[in-house]
Image (cartoon, helix red, strand yellow):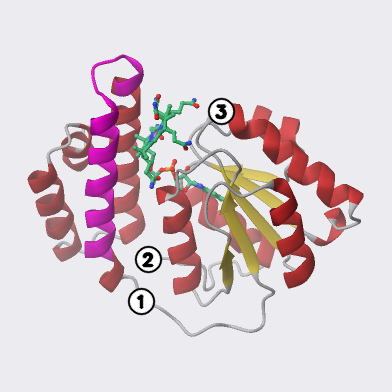
Amino acid sequence: MEDELQIAMAELDEEKTLRLVNERIQAGHSAVDIIESCRRGVEIVGEKYSDSDYFLSDLIMSEEILKEVMRILEPHIPVKGTNNRFLPIVMGTIEGDIHDLGKNIIIYLLRSSGLEVIDLGVDVTPEKFVQAVSESKAAILGISVLLSFCVGSIKKVVDLLTDAGLRDQVKVVVGGYPVNQEVKEYTGADFYANDVTEALKIYRDILGIGGGPVSGC
Ligand code: B12
């Protein structure tokens, strides 16, 4: 099915993208659906960049538009108070990688569901991930990766967690454009997701909260 919003995003048509986002909010579409259309559009931006039809400036433009989309959406995503029933979640983008738009969206949605998320930021070393899990006693570690050549560092995180005797206490979830079953198996992670719906389902399943608080918006 042709998605006008996805196409506007792929064509880097800022005005049309933001207009369609506003229209969809008014029409009662969920924030998750709107984010997903934009993500698929940005994926096409990446493909055009690979084919040399787009340039680095276009990647930067897609970042700017997506940030604007989130500025529009955030007030429509209800924020709940922190629910102390759950241990904190640690999240970060792996060493060598500075992509953070997807990670920040997931963090926003988790926090809006009342979950405590410790955001380590971008370019996070394996050692720092392990230290954060150890100190926070996190039950879930989420690692974002967009650059394929950084996947090896995720395996290092999992190996270091095992060495530190922490592997059984924490579920490792990897997310981002290049992740798939193969990446999950290679890194030793427990779960993977490369879209927002699947990501939220994984968190819900791990926390055992069915249709509960992890953002159903
Ligand atoms: C925007 C963008 C940029 C922006 C990043 C801005 C920012 N603050 O993040 C800028 C311009 C800075 C950039 C830089 C570069 N980029 Co870039 N970039 C992109 C682009 C177009 C979109 C990424 C994005 O934000 N998508 C939208 C979000 C919402 O989607 P997402 O990240 O996939 O996240 C979703 C899911 O994956 C998931 N998710 C994400 N993280 C996590 C974590 C967990 C735990 C879970 C559960 C789920 C989850 O949930 C999110 C919500 O749906 C991609 C193309 C693509 N296909 O992804 C290229 C892309 C990732 N970039 C690429 C490249 C090559 C680069 C550069 C090396 C370019 C250069 N020559 O300098 C640099 C690298 C800099 C660095 N060291 O990291 C390549 C990577 C190729 C590869 N296979 O390794 C891509 C794939 C483009 C391409 N096709 O060539 N980039």
Q: Residue at x 48, y 85 (%)?
A: 81
Q: Which residue is drawn at 75% across and 45% down?
A: 157
Q: What's under tag 3, amino acid-wise?
A: Ser
Please identify the residue farthest to the top as the structure is shown. 51
How packed mark 3 is, by other alpha carbons closer than 10 Å (few <14, some 14-19, many 20 or more), is few
Element marked by disc 3: helix
Region rendered in magenta: 49-73
Residues 91 and 9: in front is: 91
* Mark sitting earlier along the chain (1/2): 1
Is residue 108 visible in the rendered image? The answer is yes
Estimate the x, y position of residue 168 in percent, counting from the top left.
86, 57
* Mark sitting earlier along the chain (1/3): 1
> Real-space Cα distance between discs 1 and 2?
8 Å
Element marked by disc 2: loop
Estimate the x, y position of residue 92 in percent, counting from the top left.
57, 54
Q: Which residue is drawn at 69% across and 31% down?
A: 152
Q: What's under tag 1, amino acid-wise?
A: Pro
How packed mark 2 is, by other alpha carbons closer than 10 Å (few <14, some 14-19, many 20 or more), is some
Report if the beta carbon of the residue with label 3 is closer than 8 angstroms to ligand 1.
Answer: yes
Of tags 1 and 3, the one toward the viewer is: 3
* Mark sitting earlier along the chain (3/2): 3
Dominant secondary structure (helix, strand or loop) of the stretch shown in magenta = helix
Estimate the x, y position of residue 14 in percent, counting from the top left.
13, 44
> Real-space Cα distance between discs 1 and 3?
34 Å
Estimate the x, y position of residue 191 in percent, counting from the top left.
67, 45
> What residue would you read off at disc 2?
217
- The image's mark for residue 112 is none
Q: Quadrant of residue 84?
A: bottom right
